[in-house]
Image (cartoon, grey):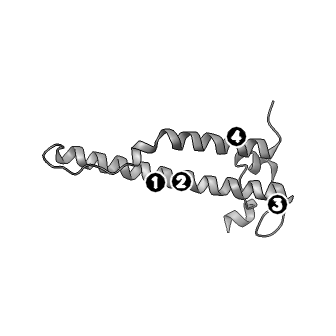
């Protein structure tokens, strides 16, 4: 059965993201640049891994912000309506992304 309560869906996704963020905090830690201990290619690989982890963290924080905004819209009764034009957001779009703030027309423009 598909969950219909947007609050439960959003809170579950929020908890999932926070759990992943908690378990992956070591990935974004600073890279040790001691040339005597780590080879150049290993450092480059570590720097690339760090950059990817930081970008992933940034995206997760962005998604948390979108989820919090969607939860605010649920509380105010504005959930499911485009924040730009006020039109109703399609159920398919909300099923795909429950935190979507825009209808497909406004998101496309």
The answer to whether mark 4 and mark 3 are in CB contact below 8 A is: no
Considering every residue shown, the one lying at the far right of the view is 77
Tell me the residue that label 3 is attached to: 81
Q: Residue at x 77, y 58 (%)?
A: 72
Instruction: Point out the frontmost of discs 2 and 4.
Output: 4
In the structure shown, which secondary structural element does the residue marked by tag 2 occupy?
Answer: helix
How many numbered markers are drawn?
4
Earlier in the chain: of badge 2 and badge 4, it is 4
In the structure shown, which secondary structural element does the residue marked by tag 1 occupy?
Answer: helix
Earlier in the chain: of badge 3 and badge 2, it is 2
Give residue 55's mark: 1
Earlier in the chain: of badge 1 and badge 3, it is 1
Earlier in the chain: of badge 4 and badge 3, it is 4
Q: In which quarter of the view is residue 103 placed?
A: bottom right
Q: Is residue 66 left or right of residue 76?
A: left
Q: Residue at x 59, y 43 (%)?
A: 17
Give residue 12's mark: 4
Label 1 – label 4 distance at C-alpha: 23 Å
Residue 55 placed where, x, y %? 46, 54
The answer to whether mark 2 and mark 4 are in CB contact below 8 A is: no
Instruction: Point out the frontmost of discs 1 and 4.
Output: 4
Q: In which quarter of the view is residue 66 placed?
A: bottom right
The answer to whether mark 1 and mark 2 are in CB contact below 8 A is: yes
Residue 35 placed where, x, y %? 15, 49
Tell me the residue that label 2 is attached to: 59
């Amino acid at each position: 059965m598909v969950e219909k309560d947007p609050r439960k869906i959003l809170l579950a996704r929020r908890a999932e993201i926070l759990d992943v963020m908690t378990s992956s905090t070591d990935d974004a830690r600073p890279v040790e640049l001691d040339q005597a201990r780590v080879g150049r290619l290993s450092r480059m690989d570590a720097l690339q891994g760090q950059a990817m982890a930081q970008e992933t963290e940034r995206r997760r924080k962005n998604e948390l912000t979108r989820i919090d905004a969607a939860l605010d819209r649920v509380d105010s009764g504005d959930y499911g309506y485009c924040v730009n034009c006020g039109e109703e957001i399609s159920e398919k779009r909300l099923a795909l992304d429950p935190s979507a703030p825009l209808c497909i027309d406004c998101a496309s423009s």
